[in-house]
């Protein structure tokens, strides 16, 4: 999974974390909706935009860019998309740009005459370096979740435990609690692709991983591939392709069969055919 996809999901489900990241109150998110916008008649897609819910000249539109790898074309792409959006939607729209880097080492180096230097030096552009985040007991949960993306692998288990305990103590909402667990699960699997089912269950503090989004996505993948094929064999093939991923996470053959709606014999045949 690409890092920017994880950020898109975090900002979509916990929009307050974005505003906390740039030093604004979490409640600022109440005025916005987070979207991915395609600019028609162009090859551009703006992946992360916080759009004001109401027209208010004092509320800016926020354009976000996540960068974990070095890319010398980053600023050219960002400002091309930004100003094209303004041209297509009204030049009088107030705007801000937020670029989120893993660290300053991946930021493009600017020459003295770089055309983007004036923009980057104005108050309209904010640059965030995640490795400089200071995480303490009082750090908001949203920022702690974002920090997981760059945390050292040996630190992840402790950070996850702290976040989940805090959510259970301070958030009296089962839906939000499950939402946070799903987000953490996605990040942990991204950071630790070889983690076993038992390790993940222990880390998340849950008894049955089959009830989490990971297992449900495995089921959905099988169904989706079947629909794309448009026939029963395609659906079966999609399910069988999910078998190694589930077994690799520590699910037993019987549990894998139950999750995917297959027989144990079909699972055995799938294993033997690889």
Image: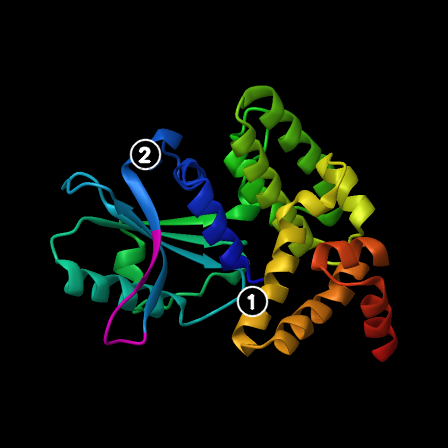
12 vs 180: above or below:
below
Between 57 and 251, the one lying in front of the other is 251
* Residue drawn where x is 32% and y is 34% of the image: 30
Asked if the magenta segment contains residue 39, the reply would be yes
Residue 86: x and y in percent read: 18, 60
Residue range (magenta): 35-43
Between 238 and 190, the one lying in front of the other is 238
171 vs 31: above or below:
above
State the CA–CA distance, disc 2 to disc 1.
Answer: 34 Å
Q: Give the quadrant of residue 147.
A: top right
| Res. 30 mark | 2
Q: Is residue 62 visible?
A: yes
* Residue drawn where x is 80% and y is 63% of the image: 263
Residue to which mark 1 is pinned: 224
Quadrant the N terminus occupies:
bottom right
Question: Callout 2: helix, strand or loop?
Answer: helix
Within-10-Å neighbours for mark 2: few <14, some 14–19, many 20+: few
* Residue drawn where x is 46% and y is 40% of the image: 14
Q: Earlier in the sequence, mark 2 or mark 1?
A: 2
């Amino acid at each position: 999974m690409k890092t920017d996809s994880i950020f898109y999901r975090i900002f979509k489900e916990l929009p307050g974390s974005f505003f906390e990241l740039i030093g604004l109150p979490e409640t600022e998110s109440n005025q916005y909706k987070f979207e991915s916008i395609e600019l028609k008649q162009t090859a551009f897609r703006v992946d992360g935009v916080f759009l004001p819910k109401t027209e208010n000249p004092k509320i800016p539109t926020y354009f976000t860019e996540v960068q974990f790898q070095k890319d010398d074309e980053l600023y050219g792409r960002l400002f091309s998309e930004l100003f094209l959006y303004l041209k297509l939607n009204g030049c009088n729209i107030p705007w801000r740009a937020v670029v989120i880097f893993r660290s300053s080492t991946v930021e493009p180096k600017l020459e003295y005459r770089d055309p983007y230097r004036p923009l980057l030096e104005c108050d309209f552009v904010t640059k965030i370096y995640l490795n400089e985040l200071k995480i303490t007991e009082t750090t908001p949960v949203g920022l702690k979740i974002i920090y997981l993306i760059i945390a050292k692998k040996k630190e992840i288990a402790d950070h996850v435990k702290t976040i989940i305990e805090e959510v259970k103590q301070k958030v009296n909402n089962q839906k939000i609690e499950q939402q946070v667990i799903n987000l953490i699960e996605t990040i942990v699997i991204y950071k630790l692709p070889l983690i076993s089912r038992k390790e993940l269950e222990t880390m998340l503090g849950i008894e049955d991983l089959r009830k989490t989004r990971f297992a449900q996505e495995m089921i959905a993948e099988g169904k989706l591939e079947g629909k794309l094929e448009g026939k029963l064999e395609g659906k079966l093939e999609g399910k069988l392709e999910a078998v190694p991923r589930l077994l690799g996470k520590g699910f037993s053959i019987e549990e894998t069969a139950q999750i995917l709606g297959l027989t144990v014999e079909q699972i055995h045949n799938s294993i033997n055919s690889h």
